[in-house]
């Protein structure tokens, strides 16, 4: 349970990155590519301020997730990432006026219930012997 704050940081930075990317793409407007403008258009998208900030935030989220994976079981940490969907759905509704209908709300409720159940199961940090055994078996 002591790594839950790190997991939630990963979730929130992941969700924030998605929201930044969406805002950036709204700012850029409809995207179209042609063979002669492909590279230029990719650079225009990647280096637009909101898209770039979103990509940078994804890097922070991934670094946090890698730290978490070094401390807890994957089967414990990974399901928490579904909470990013919850955050994105709620903030997309608030910020971008996206639809949040009954089916989405029901899905969000199921995600939250599932995440609580997984959190209650606890996690154990992999010990050095377990990690060494996995490494030794991978070279076979």
Image (cartoon, grey):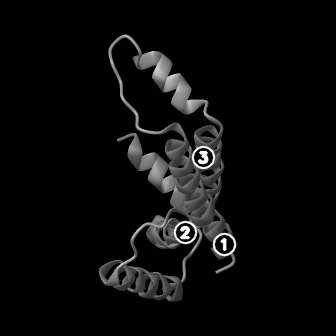
Q: Are marks 2 and 3 in contact (CB under 8 Å)?
A: no
Identify the disc placed on residue 3: 1
Q: Residue at x 62, y 43 (%)?
A: 50
Label 3 SS: helix
Quadrant into which the C terminus falls: top left
Q: Give how far across and how far down residue 8 sits, in percent.
A: 62, 70
Residue 5 in the image: above or below residue 112? above
Q: Residue at x 65, y 56 (%)?
A: 64
Q: Quadrant of residue 127?
A: bottom right
Q: Are marks 1 and 3 in contact (CB under 8 Å)?
A: no
Q: Residue furthest left?
A: 103
How many other residues sit within 10 Å of disc 3, few (<14), some (14-19) or many (≥20)? many
Identify the disc placed on residue 137: none
Identify the disc placed on residue 91: 2
Identify the disc placed on residue 54: 3
Earlier in the chain: of badge 1 and badge 3, it is 1
**Depth order, front residue of 33/113:** 33
Q: Give how far across and how far down residue 35 sits, in percent.
A: 33, 14
Quadrant into which the N terminus falls: bottom right
Q: Can residue 140 be seen?
A: yes
Mark 2 to mark 1 CA distance (whole Å):
25 Å
Q: Give how far across and how far down residue 120 sits, in percent.
A: 52, 89
Q: Residue furthest top?
A: 36
Earlier in the chain: of badge 2 and badge 3, it is 3
């Amino acid at each position: 349970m002591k790594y839950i704050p790190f997991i939630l940081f990963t979730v929130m930075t992941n969700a924030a990155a998605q929201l930044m990317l969406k805002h950036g793409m709204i700012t850029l407007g409809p995207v179209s590519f042609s063979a002669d403008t492909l590279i230029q258009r990719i650079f225009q998208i990647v280096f637009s301020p909101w898209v770039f900030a979103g990509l940078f935030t994804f890097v922070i989220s991934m670094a946090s997730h890698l730290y978490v994976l070094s401390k807890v079981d994957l089967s414990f940490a990974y399901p928490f990432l579904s909470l990013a969907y919850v955050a994105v759905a709620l903030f997309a509704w608030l910020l971008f006026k996206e639809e949040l209908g009954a089916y989405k709300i029901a899905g969000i409720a199921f995600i939250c219930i599932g995440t609580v159940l997984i959190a209650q199961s606890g996690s154990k940090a992999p010990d050095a012997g377990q990690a060494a055994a996995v490494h030794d078996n991978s070279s076979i």
